[in-house]
């Protein structure tokens, strides 16, 4: 019996040595110290032994059991240590590696600037009024005091849409956002033709001109126009509003000046320069050493235009101004070529 126990212990420990994984170890546990293992059978047979043999064999069996269990425990720990070391080795995670960049989309720089401008105008009480991009000659020119064959039209040649013989009223891509003035005034006037409500709107959007594309001119660009119509509106209101807008846009310290100018749909008309924010008025490349940057055109709405919009110029007056978000961005960021805006070059777009 004692020989048998020695045999059991020896063979169990030998087979344990070759075990390297948890599954094999579990199988070993069942066949060597499990309920039906040879060792447990020895315990079961103790009752059949004589009084003298029983304690000797019992003690030896217990010793073997303890020896096998501690060997099992030891082997189990060893396997865990090896597998941990192995996983550390093979599944190494280098936390110093830079992560994968996620490309986050963003708004086009023109849209960003457009929204900045509209946000400021909204604070000042100007509501956005969007108008169509395809217009008639009547809306785009005639009702805005550009009569047929007027030389001022030469500045704004457009793309014409073939739509049969419409005579003096062809369809075209709008050359400025100003036709929206007529559409808005007519819409507001229709609300109460006898006493039209006052208007305070911002007209944003794309405009188109038939031009040779150069660093300074594109065939498409954005404009934002402001329009205020009401009773007792004077040039002082125009100056105050523009000055407030310029300070909100370019900083409270921004200085500006008005220069007399000419536009068919405003009278009197002016162009507004802001003190060069690149050089502070000293003179630099951006302002061409003048110290001033031209940023917008403005004026009192021409009586003919008010009339065409359904507002009696004897009772109503108003002012309007227009500016280009792309031009503002070009000045601010020293962009020397307007073609970048529609060139779709990701290297340009990513900078905004
Ligand atoms: Zn300058």
Image (cartoon, grey):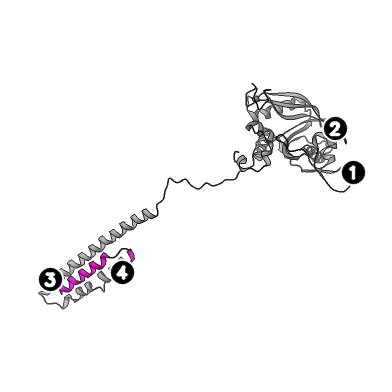
| Residue 137 pos. (x, y %) | 84, 40
Sequence order check, earlier mark of 2 and 1: 2
Return the residue found at the far bottom. 48
Quarter of image, res 191: top right
> What is the crowding at mark 3: few (fewer than 14 residues within 10 Å), some, or many (at least 20)?
few
Judged left or right of residue 148, residue 107 is left
Q: Which mark is residue 56?
A: 3
Q: Which mark is residue 27?
A: 4
Which is in the foreground here, disc 3 or disc 2?
A: 2
| Residue 131 pos. (x, y %) | 76, 42
| Residue 197 pos. (x, y %) | 78, 36
**337 in relation to 288, above or below:** below
Rendered residue at 83%/32% (across/down) = 152
Residue marked by disc 2: 151
> Which quarter shows the C terminus?
top right
Which is in the foreground here, disc 2 or disc 1?
A: 2
For the stretch drawn in magenta, what is the main secondary structure?
helix
Instruction: Find the distance from the CA under tag 2 to the CA under tag 4.
Output: 101 Å
Residue marked by disc 1: 167
> What is the crowding at mark 2: few (fewer than 14 residues within 10 Å), some, or many (at least 20)?
few
Instruction: Find the distance from the CA under tag 1 to the CA under tag 4.
Output: 99 Å
Judged left or right of residue 314, residue 85 is left
Where ligand 1 lies, by image quadrant? top right
């Amino acid at each position: 019996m004692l020989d048998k126990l020695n045999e059991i212990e020896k063979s169990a420990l030998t087979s344990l040595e070759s075990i390297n994984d948890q599954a094999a170890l579990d199988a070993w546990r069942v066949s060597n110290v499990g309920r039906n293992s040879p060792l447990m059978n020895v315990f079961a047979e103790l009752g059949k032994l004589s009084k003298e043999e029983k304690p000797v064999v019992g003690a030896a069996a217990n010793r073997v059991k303890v020896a096998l269990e501690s060997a099992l425990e030891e082997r189990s720990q060893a396997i865990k240590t090896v597998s941990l070391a192995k996983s550390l080795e093979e599944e190494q995670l280098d936390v110093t590696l830079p992560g994968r960049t996620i490309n986050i989309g963003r708004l086009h720089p023109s849209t960003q600037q457009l929204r900045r401008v509209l946000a400021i105008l909204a604070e000042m009480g100007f509501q956005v009024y969007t108008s169509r991009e395809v217009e008639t000659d009547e809306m785009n020119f005639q009702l805005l005091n550009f009569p047929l064959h007027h030389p001022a039209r030469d500045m704004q040649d457009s793309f014409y849409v073939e739509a049969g013989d419409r005579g003096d009223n062809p369809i075209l891509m709008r050359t400025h956002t100003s036709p929206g003035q007529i559409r808005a005034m007519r819409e507001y006037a229709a609300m109460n033709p006898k006493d039209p409500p006052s208007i305070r709107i911002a007209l944003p959007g794309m405009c188109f001109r038939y031009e040779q594309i150069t660093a300074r001119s594109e065939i498409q660009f954005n404009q934002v126009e402001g329009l205020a119509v009401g009773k007792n509106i004077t040039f002082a209101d125009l100056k105050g509003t523009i000055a407030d807008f310029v300070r909100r846009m370019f900083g409270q310290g921004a200085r500006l000046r008005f220069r007399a100018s000419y536009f068919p749909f405003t009278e009197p008309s002016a162009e507004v320069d802001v003190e060069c924010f690149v050089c502070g008025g000293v003179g630099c490349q951006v302002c061409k050493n003048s110290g001033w940057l031209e940023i917008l055109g403005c004026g009192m709405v021409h009586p003919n235009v008010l009339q065409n919009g359904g507002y009696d110029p004897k009772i109503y007056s108003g002012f309007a101004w227009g500016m280009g978000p792309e031009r503002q961005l070009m000045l601010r960021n020293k962009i020397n070529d307007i073609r970048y805006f529609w060139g779709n070059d990701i290297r340009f777009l990513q900078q905004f």
